[in-house]
Amino acid sequence: MITTEQQVLFYSNAPFAAAINHILDNFCPFDLAAAIYQYCFYKDTQYSIQQLVQKLQEKEMHYIEKGVEVLSMLENTNTLGRIFAHKQDITTYLLENLTPFSYVAYAKICKSFMGHITFSTNDVRTHHPQGMSAPFQNYLEDD
């Protein structure tokens, strides 16, 4: 059995790789050398993929952090309350241009909202300045 330590003999980046390659090219049968080179190819490919995965994970973490920063900013500016101020426009658009499923998905999100509803996206005064607004389902029934 070839141990993990012994496998290093076949690594293309080992400090003695040139000497091993010299032996493979000049003294080993072709099929043995080809098998070792094939192993080297697979290990090199594995390491390249591992490096790529690590870089992608780092990039993913960067974008997760940036997304959380933006989401926090959106929460601080009461973005949902400002968008929900235009419930009639959103409802009309959904029912005229999209499917009933789109409206149901939107309504489900609306019902879970328990924040302040503003007069519009530009006028940030709220309908309920004394505190949290009534559950959004009441707001949906205001038509």
Image (spheres, grey):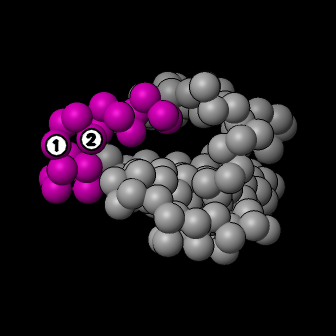
User: Residue 13 is drawn in which quadrant?
Assistant: bottom right
| Residue bearing mark 1 | 99
Specify whether residue 76 is in view: yes
Which residue shows up at 26% across the image and 56% down it? 93
Q: Counting other residues with Cα less than 10 Å from the Cα at mark 1, is it few (<14), some (14-19), or many (20 or more)?
A: few
Mark 1 and mark 2 in contact? Answer it, CB < 8 Å: yes
Which residue shows up at 16% across the image and 43% down it? 99
Magenta: main secondary structure = helix
Specify whether residue 59 is in view: no
| Residue bearing mark 2 | 102
Marks 1 and 2, how far apart at CA: 5 Å
Q: Which residues are magenta?
A: 93-110
| Closer-to-camera residue (83/2) | 2
Hey, what amino acid is under mark 1? Thr
Residue 101 vertical position relative to residue 78 in the rendered view, above or below:
above
Q: Is residue 80 left or right of residue 14?
A: left
Hey, what amino acid is under mark 2? Ser
Q: Is residue 133 left or right of residue 33?
A: right
Residue 85 vertical position relative to residue 136 in the rendered view, above or below:
below
Which residue shows up at 66% across the image and 74% down it? 18
